[in-house]
Amino acid sequence: MSAVVEPVSRGMLRRAGRRARHWVPAGVVLVGGIAAWQGLVTALDIQKFLLPKPTEIVQALRENWRFLWGAGIATFQQALGGFAIGAGMGVLVALVLARWRFLGSALLPYAIAANAIPIIAFAPIFNNWFGLINPVSKMAIASVICFFPVMINALRGLTSVHPSSIELMRSYAAGEGPSSGGCGFRTPCPTCSPGSRWPRSSP
């Protein structure tokens, strides 16, 4: 039984050409940058502890990949746990502050001020509380990074529900809880998503 080979359409070739033209410049810059990095480090005789060569980095990765893989998995678990705790607490606090507006007006300035504190100031405190090598201290630091952006953005979304939406829910005999849940949970999604993306990209 002979296989039938269908000819490649011109449209697929054009799309492949456009993609190649899009990615080729970036690939050339990447290769050129790595080559310049290797050449400059060799020519200027820069010490390894200041700036290693790309070939030395690849060699170290090859020799220590088991250790680096285990450390990477542990770091990912701690970061994911901290993100879940911080984002969950941020949404819960935002719900409370949105339900009782006077609390939000009183506490939001302090939350913004606390968000301006560098995270390096929290690290020694959590290390003393939970231990230097305890994973909980790393998760606590990650949760602090996530908490404030998610809470502020979620609160902004929860307090910007259109009054007509709440009136519509109340016309269906919904109480305060269902009205806030039915309208409030959909409104903060566009504002809460950027708040959750920001801490994920933080160091």
Image: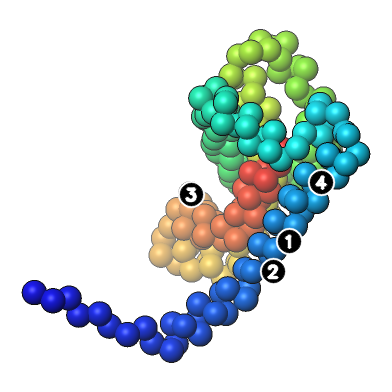
Amino acid type of the residue that numbered disc 4 sits on in the rendered structure = Gly
Image coordinates of residue 168 in percent, x first then y, are 48, 68
Task: Please provide percent x and percent y for residue 97.
Answer: 65, 43
Whether label 2 touches label 3, CB < 8 Å? no
Quadrant containing the N terminus is bottom left
Q: CA distance from mark 2 to mark 3?
A: 54 Å
- Residue located beneath label 4 in the image: 39
Q: CA distance from mark 1 to mark 2?
A: 6 Å
Q: Where, by quadrant of the figure, is residue 40 drawn?
A: top right
Q: Farthest residue toward the right?
A: 44
Q: Amino acid at mark 3?
A: Gly
Q: Which residue is the site of mark 1?
A: 29
- Distance between the alpha carbons at the discs numbered 1 and 4: 15 Å
Where is residue 142, by image quadrant?
A: top right
Residue 200 in picture, x, y percent from top left: 63, 44
Position above or below: 40 against 61: below
Task: Identify the residue at horizontal 70%, vertical 56% (top origin).
Answer: 31
What sort of colour scheme is used for the picture?
rainbow
The answer to the question of whether label 1 and label 2 lie on touching residues, with beta carbons closer than 8 A, is yes
Can you identify the residue that label 2 sits on?
Answer: 25
Q: Residue 112 — which label?
A: none
Q: Identify the mark at residue 177; answer none if there is no mark.
A: 3
Amino acid of disc 1: Val
The residue at the point 83 percent across, 39 percent down is 42
Between the residue at mark 3 and the residue at mark 4, the CA separation in whole angstroms equals 65 Å
Q: Nearer the viewer, mark 1 or mark 3?
A: 1
